[in-house]
Image: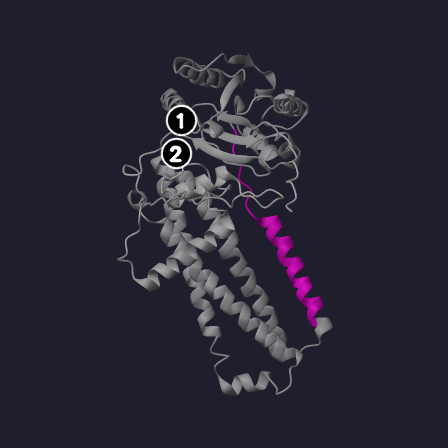
Amino acid sequence: MTNPQSPKKPEPKKPAKVFVLLVRHYRQRESANEVAEALQAATKQLPTKDCPKITQIWYGKDYRARDTALIIRDKLLSGGSGNIQFEYYPNLDPTPDRGGSYEPGKGYNNLIKCLTKFIMCAQEECDAIMLVGHQPQLGWIAEDLTGTAHPINNAEILCIETDKERLSKHQGRLRWSIAPTDKAASRALLEKIRSKMQLATVLGGLILPSFALFFDPEKLGKLTTPMLTGRSLALYIATGLLLLALALYMATMYCYDRLLMPKRFWEQQKPRARPQATDRAGDTNDAADEVGNVLHNRPQATDQAGDTNCTCNTQQHKPVVRSQATPPLRSLVTRTGWDLQDRITGGQQPDWLVRRPPSSDTWILYQNMKRIWYWMFMPATYMVAAALLFLAFAVLDAYLIWFLIWAVAGVLIFLFLYLRGRPHLGTED
């Protein structure tokens, strides 16, 4: 006797997705025209779920901000966009005595309150508002929405996705960017990547001589004993940290070298299907299964008569079969790598990366460069510092308490000097 399936509970309605478009005023009128045309093209090319429906444009009193907003509004209206409310907003003025963009104060707080009200009251999916203003105020708005300040060039558009839930947590996402052509910035960024790659090469090379200690029986015998002591344990930990740091430095070199690949040879892998959704009865979601079949090029299930469960012509839409000429070992490594990446990223484009198109290759390089730096290079450097501390403990044979006191004091002195002396960058109009 089979139990009847329990009725499915209705899923809670997700809050409406809202887009906030931040636009910095132009420096040359031609750049604003270029960006406006690119935005008009992007609204026709982007999927519906990622295409902002601009309903309001706020701009400051400065003539450059007003002209930039006018150029973009006229281009959108000529492309068939609906009614757009065009409004002067005084708190977007760069006037310090009003708490404008050069100084956070009451004016900026009022701007954030009005922006929050727009986001909270949004009813339709993909409603969007555009703010045309100045730096550093636009960077502050981006930080309030996403938790991170983003650079924005003159006449550039940053599209930030948020909603009611993510707004209070500062978890908005930078979805894409449209900027004027800037070849000088691209060349400077590539030079920066080369310098980081050379630094990783040098630091990785400096680790190798330290292993001479571990392969010298005479020196190693002075630090180790048959029993597991504190010195021996510190030496083993230092060895493991140095090996892991060396591996991360090599991975940094490889990743930065990949970023230096000419744009002409960039490849785009096919997106993988997300895991199928299941209900409490264990049945899979048919729509998700259909998407999985299409993305993985799997033939659909057939009934007893041999007919496929679809109305399309199977002769015209044959499944794509991978070439069998790939060597078995290489095919195994490739599949294993992609499976591991799919488990980490969900088979889709990561949320931290801007969408391309319409974003430029400069933004792709910039975001990847920063991610490699913070997730590979910096952890490797921290591991080297920790390994040196463990090596110092093993060589000096000091009392653990005194060694920890001196180590903590040294770390605090370093952090104080670094935080006091590190560069502080910023932009303003």
Q: Amino acid at mark 2?
A: Pro
Which residue corresponds to the image point at 50% horizontal and 52% vertical from the top-left? 343
* Residue under label 1: 42
Q: Looking at the image, is mark 1 or mark 2 earlier in the sequence?
A: 1
Where is residue 334? Give x, y as percent. 38, 57
Gap between marks 1 and 2 measured at Cα: 8 Å
Q: Does the magenta segment cover residue 57?
A: no
* Residue under label 2: 357
The answer to whether mark 1 and mark 2 are in CB contact below 8 A is yes
Where is residue 73? Give x, y as percent. 45, 15
Q: Within 10 angstroms of label 2, few (less than 14), some, or many (20 or more) residues? A: few
Where is residue 2? Give x, y as percent. 63, 45
Magenta range is 403-428
Q: Secondary structure at mark 2?
A: loop
Q: Within 10 angstroms of label 1, few (less than 14), some, or many (20 or more) residues? A: some
Secondary structure, magenta segment, majority class: helix
Q: Secondary structure at mark 1?
A: helix
Dividing the picture into quadrants, the one containing residue 387 is: bottom right
